[in-house]
Amino acid sequence: MEKNAKVYVAGHRGLVGSALVSRLRAEGFGNFLLKTHQELDLREQKAVNDFFAAEKPEYVFLAAAKVGGIGANNTYPADFIYNNLAIQNNVIHASYIYNVRKLLFLGSACIYPKVCQLPIKEEYLLSGPLEPTNEPYAVAKIAGLKMCQSYNRQYGANFIAVMPANLYGPGDNFDLQNSHVIPALLRKFHEAKTSGEKKVTLWGTGAPWREFLHADDMADGCIFLMEHFNPTKEQNERGEIFANLGMGQDITIKDLAELIQKITGYEGKIEWDPAKPDGVFRRTLDISRIRALGWRHKIELDQGLKTTYDWYQSNCNLK
């Protein structure tokens, strides 16, 4: 990507989008096209087409999405599938119509089957049933990935995708009803510490394993793929237009909770509520495809959790 190229980051206020903009700025990019949801509703096809027609972005990072944890996915399945399909359809199609040079679509590791050989390779996509708790979201992300592949195949577009591990970092959503596991745990332990609660009750059994990736590493990996990953026609035919992105290691939710308890300084007791869902038991990604291209994460989990907690303490009154 040329430093003066027009770069559109869809979802620039979100966890990944904001990290992308920061990293791109640090690398010398400055010709950004940035629109808030109020300025441009990506669910509205005409609005999206008008924006692309007027601005003509050269590179697109599609990080805009409706996201949430198990609770939100269970409660709002229609919202998750409708909003994500609408956003993807409009941005990907407009990128083709208005000759975007390259697009990167941000997917999710939940696209893979609930029961899957580990570590999960990209070719395991569609090899079995999905995890029911986030199936609508996963179906939308699979559709986005297949849409990119189809536009490459039919029109010769250069659309790629990335499937990250669970993301976290400064600027995350800390709403207890709709957030992912790390921000939810950080907030729960922080509030329990400040209010003097003697115990914290957490969802599930703590037994499942999860792989996490800091948003800054995610941004670094996305930019790396944009600059170094250009699938051939043969790779596109095989569906090899996307790469897993992660650390290549995972941790149990129980160990994660105890690590966050230590970082936040909470000295009370942890109780688990097995009546609440655990989600898929384990989903460790095989990251050999992006490793072979030369990329590796830089931020270890304990370091990333500490900086995320520092950010939350400085901004929790604003969340």
Image (spheres, grey):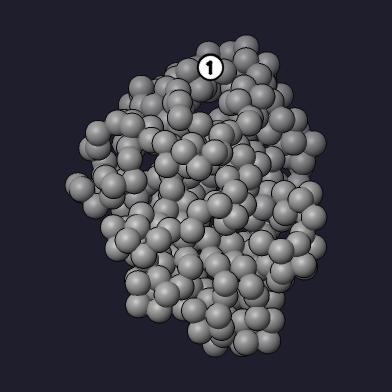
Position of residue 200 in the picture relative to residue 24 (left or right): left
Residue at x 36%, y 22% (from the top left corner):
207
Residue at x 45%, y 30% (from the top left corner):
248
Quadrant location of the N terminus in the rendered image:
bottom right
Residue 136 in the image: above or below residue 243: below
Residue topped by disc 1: 258
Residue farthest left in this picture? 128
Q: Position of residue 246 (x, y in %)?
A: 49, 37
Residue at x 51%, y 22% (from the top left corner):
256
Q: Amino acid at mark 1?
A: Glu
Residue 94 in the image: above or below residue 206: below
Q: Position of residue 315 (x, y in %)?
A: 77, 41
Query: Is residue 103 in view from this perspective?
Result: yes
Secondary structure category for the residue under label 1: helix
Residue 270 in the image: above or below residue 70: above
Query: Is residue 184 in view from this perspective?
Result: no
